[in-house]
């Protein structure tokens, strides 16, 4: 042993080395996750001299371990080796990791390299980072070249103009690489690099790289150039776009691969917002209609998601003449996924068309979609009705759509019924008390008896929200008597729902209503023959006591104790602590704890 080092000084690196050599993958993984702690124990000097070289040689391992190492080195690891001035030392192990076979490891290593670059100075970048980038870009294996594509944008604007020229040339070579995986990576990262280019370099270099990739024979390369196109468009003026990119836009929209057209459909609004109003009217309207009528359902679905956003860029007359006919056709589409995508977006047209056009053109389509056989279509149209109500008013909405909503409230799909329940409080706000009581009051109570628990649970939450909308006095008249009445129902599920409804709505009520109209019923249910009901009564009592504050706790406590003693002939156990804990015999031969946070002053005599 070197006499210059003590056992304590050598121990951390020795432990790490031993665990990394272990046959147990989990031990090696744990060692990597502790590498920052080990670096801290070693100190900056030894971490630089011993730990970093050791990690640089530790790439012959399972992918899971290598992924963890790549991640750890990107977590401000320079702090453990002496600060940012030594950050370049981390590039060594990360360079090795960025050339391994596993894609996840390479991606994480590239991400960590960019994080390290963020704390490096310009001299460090030019002295250490750029050579690393050049080595990876010219690596023998395609893995290193794919990783290199992700590293250009991070430092492009932080180096001198001559080096920037080299970087543009290097990236152009990657864009023409013989291996499709490298060209795919070049397409993926070109957009972020172009955003760092000056306009003259976008025109001179960015466009040429993009055109090469956009005409690639692999559709997996071409589909990634859609976002590159948007980045270039955002950097150019409308006349420059018209002169330089019109051909590429047309080729991309009508690409022979549906995957490319799908990508265009997903990003169409971004493209339209970037090209300017003139090109939108002259070119993109026709292209968008083409996508809405595409032969592939996936493309039509993607385009349908862009309807409101794209229509915002158009005049009302163009929307009615070009977009609405396509929407009408999509309502009849053979694909349920296309109809679902449309249903989720169609209501966004209402504010753009105005009241009269919405009533004439969109309202029939809403009604048609509300009767669609596919549940997701109905769910999507229901969830967005608020936008329609804002435009056409509640009177017309209730007249046209309320019958359909009531029909859907009894739909065989419980998810549809649940969606209707979630929409009810909003509809109640717009309808007002009298109309709601007349048309929807009984419907809301009927949900409490639904066969599906999720519906009964949603119905109790709905009653709470309605109480907040219409007020406590309305709830006392319209909700509380009906909920309490269910406590006598022969069906145990309805009695259970009564207890759950009380627990849910009680915080929105007053103490007078709870103690006068609810508590007696609740305590009567405490002797229900169904054990689960008795258990939920206990939980409900706790909710009531903890909800209403100290004074309420005292009142509820005295009433609860009196009634519980009347209902139960078995002794109660009192255990005074900092808080009082009532032990109630709820289930025969078993004790269930029911806790009320009350002071000892409320102990019954």
Image: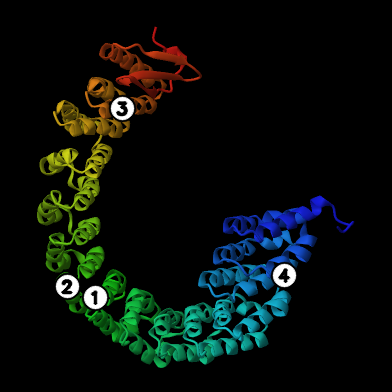
The image quarter in which residue 462 lies: top left
Cα–Cα gap, marks 2 and 1: 9 Å
Which residue is denoted by mark 1 in the rendering?
297
Residue identified by numbered label 4: 89
Mark 4 lies on a secondary structure that is: helix
Q: Residue furthest right?
A: 3
Q: Tell me if residue 572 can be seen.
A: yes
Mark 3 closeness class: few <14, some 14–19, many ≥20 residues within 10 Å? some
| Disc number for residue 553 | none
Q: Do the residues labelled 2 and 1 touch (CB within 8 Å)?
A: yes
CA–CA distance in space, label 4 to label 1:
51 Å
Q: Earlier in the sequence, mark 3 or mark 4?
A: 4
Per the model, the C-alpha gap separating discs 2 and 4 is 59 Å
- Front position in the image: 460 or 46: 46
N-terminal-most mark, 2 or 1: 1
Q: Is residue 448 left or right of residue 179?
A: left
Where does the image place residue 545, in percent across and percent down from the top left?
37, 24
Q: Residues within 10 Å of mark 2 (few under 14, many from 20)?
A: some
Q: Residue furthest front?
A: 23
Give above or below for 409 relative to 17. Answer: above
The residue carrying mark 2 is 333
Which residue position holds label 3? Answer: 535
Q: Which of marks 4 and 1 is nearer the N terminus?
A: 4
Q: How far apart are marks 1 and 3 (CA)?
A: 52 Å
Please, is residue 177 above or below residue 100 in the view?
A: below
């Amino acid at each position: 042993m070197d006499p210059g080092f003590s056992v304590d000084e050598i121990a951390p690196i020795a432990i790490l080395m031993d665990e990394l050599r272990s046959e147990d993958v989990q031990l090696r993984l744990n060692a990597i996750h502790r590498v920052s702690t080990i670096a801290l124990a070693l100190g900056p000097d030894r971490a630089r001299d011993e730990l970093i070289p050791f990690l640089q040689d530790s790439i012959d391992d399972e992918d899971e371990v290598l992924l963890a190492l790549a991640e750890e080195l990107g977590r401000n690891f320079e702090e453990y080796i002496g600060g940012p001035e030594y950050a370049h030392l981390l590039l060594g192990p990360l360079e090795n990791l960025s050339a391994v076979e596993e894609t996840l490891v390479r991606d994480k290593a590239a991400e960590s390299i960019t994080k390290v670059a963020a704390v490096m100075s310009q001299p460090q970048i030019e002295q250490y980072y750029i050579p690393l980038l050049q080595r990876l870009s010219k690596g023998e294996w395609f893995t290193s070249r794919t990783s290199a594509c992700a590293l250009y944008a991070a430092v492009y604007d932080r180096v001198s103009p001559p080096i920037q020229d080299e970087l543009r040339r290097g990236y152009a070579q990657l864009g023409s690489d013989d291996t499709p995986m490298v060209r795919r990576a070049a397409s993926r990262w070109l957009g972020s690099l172009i955003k760092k280019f000056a306009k003259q370099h976008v025109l001179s270099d960015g466009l040429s790289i993009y055109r090469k990739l956009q005409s690639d024979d692999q559709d997996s390369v071409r589909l990634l150039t859609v976002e590159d196109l948007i980045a270039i468009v955002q950097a150019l003026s409308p006349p420059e776009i018209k002169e330089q990119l019109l051909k590429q836009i047309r080729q991309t929209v009508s690409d022979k691969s549906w995957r490319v057209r799908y990508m265009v459909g997903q990003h169409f609004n971004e493209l339209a917002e970037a090209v300017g109003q003139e090109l939108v009217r002259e070119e993109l309207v026709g292209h968008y209609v083409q996508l809405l009528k595409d032969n592939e359902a996936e493309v039509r679905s993607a385009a349908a998601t862009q309807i409101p956003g794209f229509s915002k860029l158009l005049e009302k007359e163009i929307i009615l003449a070009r977009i609405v006919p396509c929407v009408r056709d999509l309502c009849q589409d053979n694909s349920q996924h296309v109809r679902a995508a449309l249903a989720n977006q169609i209501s966004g047209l209402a504010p753009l068309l105005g009241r009269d056009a919405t009533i004439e053109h969109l309202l029939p389509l809403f009604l048609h979609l509300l009767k669609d056989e596919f549940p997701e279509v109905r769910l999507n149209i229901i969830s967005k009705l608020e936008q329609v109500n804002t435009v056409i008013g509640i009177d017309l909405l209730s007249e046209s759509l309320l019958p359909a909503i009531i029909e859907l409230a009894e739909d065989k799909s419980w998810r549809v019924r649940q969606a209707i329940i979630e929409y009810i409080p909003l509809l109640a706000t717009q309808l007002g008390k009298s109309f709601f009581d007349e048309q929807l009051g009984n419907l809301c109570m009927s949900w409490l008896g639904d066969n599906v628990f999720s519906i009964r649970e949603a119905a109790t939450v709905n009653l709470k929200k309605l109480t907040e909308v219409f007020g406590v006095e309305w709830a006392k008249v319209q909700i509380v008597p009906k909920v309490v009445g269910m406590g006598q129902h022969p069906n145990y599920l309805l009695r259970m729902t009564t207890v759950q409804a009380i627990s849910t709505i009680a915080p929105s009520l007053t103490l007078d209503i709870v103690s006068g109209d609810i508590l007696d019923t609740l305590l009567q249910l405490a002797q229900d023959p169904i054990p689960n009901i008795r258990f939920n009564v206990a939980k409900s009592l706790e909710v009531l006591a903890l909800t209403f504050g100290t004074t309420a706790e005292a009142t509820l406590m005295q009433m609860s104790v009196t009634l519980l003693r009347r209902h139960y002939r078995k002794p109660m156990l009192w255990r005074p602590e900092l808080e009082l804990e009532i032990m109630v015999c709820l289930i025969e031969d078993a004790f269930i704890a029911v806790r009320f946070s009350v002071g000892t002053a409320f102990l019954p005599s």
